[in-house]
Image (tube, grey):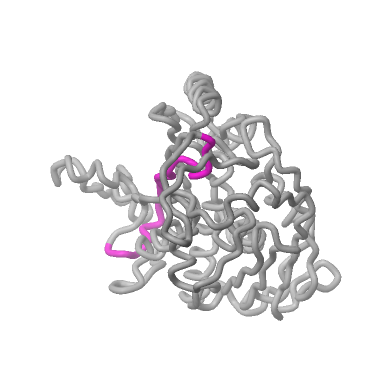
Amino acid sequence: MTGNTFGKLFRLTTFGESHGKAVGCVIDGCPAGLDLSEADIQKELERRKPGGWLASPRKEKDEVRILSGVFEGKTLGTPIAMVVENRDVDSRPYEEIKDIFRPGHADYTYHAKYGIRDWRGGGRASARETVARVAGGAVAKKLLGTFGIRVVGYTREIAGVECDVSGLTLDEIHARAEKSDVRCPDSEAEKQMIERVVEARKEGDSVGGIAEVIVSGVPPGLGEPVFWKLDAYLAFAFMGVPAVKGVEIGRGFKAARMRGSEHNDWMTWEKGVRFLSNNAGGVLGGISTGQDIVIRAAIKPTASISKVQKTVTVRGENVEISVKGRHDPCIVPRAIPVLEAMAALVIADCMMLQGLIPRFLV
C-alpha cells in the first residue's frame, strides 16, 4: 500500500484536492460480473454530500461518472475509474490566510513534509477527498451484498450526548438514522445533539462525537493471526479517515474496567457455535467470529472555526486567525458513510484474501 492506495487484492487509489478540478478513484481487483451502475455509486454519495442545514453550505451535486471497468451494467474485472467534478468552488476566503497555518489542520505538517501545499480549502488533506472513498466503498458494499453482508453506521454520540439503541434491530437503526439530521436513531438524544451543534455554531465553534459501524453477515475466519489481524486492519482503515482520533472494537476501552468473567463471550452449541454475548465486537485473536463486527470512531471537533485562535505564519510570525468559509459545525453525521465505506473495503479485501470471493462472478 502507498499513501494514496488502500487494500491488498481489492485496491482503491484516490486522487484530487478540495478545490481542484475533480476528485476520484481507481478500483483494481474487483471481480468480473458484478452488477454495477452509476446509480449504485450515486446513492452512497448522496449520503455524504454537503448542503444540509447542519452541514457545510457548499453546494456540490457530486455526480459520479464511471470512466472504465464497467460494460453493459457489469464489471469487467479491469480497473474501475470514477470521477466527481468539483463545481461549487470558492477559494477567496482562503487567499488572505494562505500563508497562515490553521490550528487543527494539516497546513503545517504538509508544509513540513512537502515544502509546498494547496492552500485552497485544505487541498488533499480536506475531507473532500473522502468522496472517492465513498465511491470505492459503494462498489465494495455492492460486492459484499451478494454474499449477504451489510454495513450500517450511525451517530453514537455528539458533544457528550449519547444515544440508546438497545432493543433496536439493525434495520431499525439504519432506518431511523437515515431520517435524522444528525444520523441518530434515538429521537430524544437527537434533539439534544442538534441543540449542542447549533449552540456551538452560534458561538463560532464546533463539536465532535462518536460514530459506530456494524458489519453483519461476516463469516468466521477472516483476518490474519499476527500482523494483519482483522481488528488491526479495521483500526488502520478508520484512523486514516480525516478527523478520526480514536478507534475501539466491541467493548473497547470499557473492557479495561471489566473482569475476565464479565468480558469473555461464553459459547454454546446450537447446530454450530453460538456466542451468548459480543463484548469482543466480532473479532477474537484478530480473526472474525461470525458475529456482528462492532467498531467505533472518536471524531474530533471540526478544525475550521471562526473563533479567534493563536497561530504562526510560514515566515515564523505570531498572528491570530479567524477561519472563514463554509464548514461543518460537526462532522460526525457526514463521516458515517465514509467509515462505512472503509469497513466495506476492509471486509471485501479480507474476503478475497481468504478466497471467499472469486475473480469471476459469472
Q: What residue is drawn where x is 36% and y is 58%?
A: 289
137 relative to 71 in the view: left or right: left
Magenta span includes 186: no
Q: What residue is drawn where x is 38% and y is 54%?
A: 271
Q: What residue is drawn where x is 18% and y is 45%?
A: 256
Q: What residue is drawn where x is 75% and y is 48%?
A: 60
Q: Is residue 360 visible?
A: yes
Q: Quadrant of the C terminus?
A: bottom right
The image shows residue 27, relative to residue 61, as above or below, that is below
Magenta span includes 295: yes
87 relative to 202 in the view: left or right: right
Q: Position of residue 178 (x, y in %)?
A: 62, 35
43 relative to 197 in the view: left or right: right
Q: Position of residue 277 (x, y in %)?
A: 31, 43
Observer-nearest residue: 199 or 285? 199
The image shows residue 114, relative to residue 91, as above or below, that is below
Q: Position of residue 11 (x, y in %)?
A: 57, 74
Observer-nearest residue: 302 or 234? 302
Q: How many marks?
A: 0
Q: Is residue 362 visible?
A: no
Span of residues in magenta: 285-306
What is the quadrant of residue 141 in the picture?
Answer: bottom right
The image shows residue 132, relative to residue 2, as above or below, that is above
Observer-nearest residue: 320 or 239? 320
Observer-nearest residue: 232 or 288? 232
Q: Position of residue 62 (x, y in %)?
A: 75, 52
